[in-house]
Image: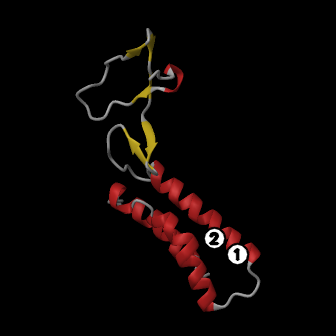
């Protein structure tokens, strides 16, 4: 099986391997600091830093859906709105939470803003 060298990249995970260069087919592979894998953004330092990329991605996606609900739904029945929130918004915020587990207070507050925005 032949690999497309232009699509192959390297990400150094941890501190011990920094500075190594990898080559494939005579060309040097590009380095990346973060990569999306199975729906979760992973950084090279393996930490969910404050307002990490995955948190921002999840909140932006959830806010997009909330905005769409606000603009398209005219009759806002409580039961219907709760069902829309639970099926359309919450999955974006809770997606892969076990894998990236926000432990910084800023990340948690950033995610909770979506929940506070809904009742308004």
Q: Residues within 10 Å of mark 2 (few under 14, many from 20)?
A: some
Residue at 61%, 91% in the rendered image: 78
Residue wearing tag 2: 66
**Quadrant where the image shows the C terminus:** bottom right
- In the image, taking residue 101 as reference, residue 33 lies left or right, namely right
Find residue 115 and report its horizontal and vertical position in percent.
51, 74
Where residue 18 appears, as percent x and y from the top left, is: 30, 24
Give the distance between the C-alpha atoms of the residues marked 2 and 1, in whole angstroms: 6 Å
- 11 or 110, which is in the foreground? 11
Identity of the residue drawn at 51% across and 59% down = 58
Relative placement, left or right, of 32 versus 70 is: left
Residue 87, position in %: x, y?
Answer: 55, 75
Closest to the observer, 30 or 23? 23
Give the number of the disc on residue 30: none
Residue at point 35%, 16% (across, down): 21
Q: Is residue 115 left or right of residue 101?
A: right
Q: Where is residue 118, by image quadrant?
A: bottom right
Q: How is the image coloured?
A: secondary structure
Judged from the image, the secondary structure of the residue bearing numbered disc 2 is helix
Q: Quadrant of residue 29?
A: top left
The extreme top residue here reads: 26
- In the depicted view, which residue is nearer to us: 3 or 114? 3
Q: Quadrant of the N terminus?
A: top left
The correct choice, above or below, for 43 with respect to 15 in the image is: below
Q: Vertical placement of 83 versus 16: above or below?
A: below
Residue 60 occupies which quadrant of the picture?
bottom right
**Secondary-structure class at tag 1:** helix
Give the labeled residue for mark 1.
70
- Residue 63 horizontal/vertical position (percent): 60, 65
Q: Are marks 2 and 1 in contact (CB under 8 Å)?
A: yes
């Amino acid at each position: 099986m032949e690999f497309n060298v232009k699509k192959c990249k390297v990400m150094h995970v941890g501190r011990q391997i920094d500075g190594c260069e990898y080559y494939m087919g005579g060309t040097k592979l590009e380095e990346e600091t973060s990569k999306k894998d199975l729906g979760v953004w992973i950084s090279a330092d393996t930490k969910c830093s404050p307002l990490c990329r995955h948190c921002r991605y999840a909140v932006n996606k959830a806010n997009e859906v909330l905005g769409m609900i606000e603009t398209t739904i005219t009759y806002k029945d409580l039961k219907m709105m709760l069902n829309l929130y639970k099926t359309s918004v919450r999955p974006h915020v809770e997606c892969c939470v076990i894998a990236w587990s926000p432990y910084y207070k800023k990340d948690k507050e950033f995610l909770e803003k979506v929940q506070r925005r809904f009742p308004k």
